[in-house]
Image: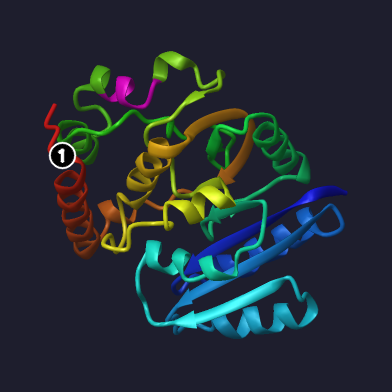
Amino acid sequence: MIKESVSFCVVTFNNVDRIEKLVNNLIEVLDGRITYKLYVVDNGSTDGTTEIIDKLKQKNRNIILYEQKNVGFGAGHNSVMGDLKSTYHVVINPDVQITSFVEISKMISFLKGHKNVGLLSPLILNTDGSIQRLYKREPTVFDLLIRFVSPNFFKKRQNEFVRMESGYKEIGRIDYASGAFMMFRTEIFKAINGFDERYFMYMEDADITRKVNKIATSVFYPKAFVIHEWQRESHKKIKHVIYSVVSLCKYFSKWGWKYY
């Protein structure tokens, strides 16, 4: 059993179809192998999510449920910060699955051996095993705009943005990690005060990566992987398009407007 401890936090809003699967997956992967806590932060679900978590936590005291109004992704994750006593802290989406503890063990081993690393971003795969291209460079307005328009628009530039030339095989510094799965050194997560709560959703992962990189290093670590059932909500609903635009403006207003 690994002596270090790890905490997981998932923020959920009407994800009843996924949250039970995730919680059961984490219990299966973690139980008996490491000391852990699983925080489920419910942002005002109305679909029975909290009832499911209540039943699950009666059987496993490592599960802690937070119930609150919908304060957004970053603020939801920050709500557990005062309770964190772990060595490592994982931000995880409801639609992520971990195949075995081996993957978690590899991430922890890397962080143990590299004290300068404050954030680890693993290889993220689709359910069919293909790679999600999330090894991103620091974004510009142009990069985000062309990705929104079409995956085939300015294809060479888009490939450069997601570091296609890397082959997704080598460990390297990352400028913009995906919020679907982030493993932090807990002391670093606390030192930067977690996520910037001015973002309701979108761009908070780019922002927190930059915050980590100011005091430590964020690393893309393709030697371990997780599976992510990617939901592209920002392309489906007008309110998510609005959230995207508002967050983009907040991001560049904070870090400086870099157009190209």
Q: Compared to 240, does 101 lie above or below?
A: above
Residue drawn at x 54%, y 55% is 92
Circle 1 residue: 256
Rate crowding at label 1 as few (under 14), some (14 to 19) or many (20 or more) other CA atoms within 10 Å.
Answer: few
Which amino acid does the dot numbered 1 rest on?
Gly
| x, y percent for residue 82 | 54, 69
Magenta stretch bounds: 158-163
What secondary structure is found at the residue carrying circle 1? loop
Asked if one can make out residue 145 in the rendered structure from this viewpoint, the answer is yes
212, 232: nearer the viewer: 212
Which quadrant is home to the C terminus?
top left
Residue drawn at x 69%, y 72% is 63
Q: Compared to 1, does 108 lie above or below?
A: above
Query: Is 32 a magenta residue?
Result: no
Q: Compared to 71, does 58 lie above or below?
A: below
Residue drawn at x 53%, y 54% is 91
| x, y percent for residue 227 | 59, 44
Q: Compared to 96, does 17 lie above or below?
A: below
104, 218: nearer the viewer: 218
Magenta-colored segment: predominant secondary structure = helix
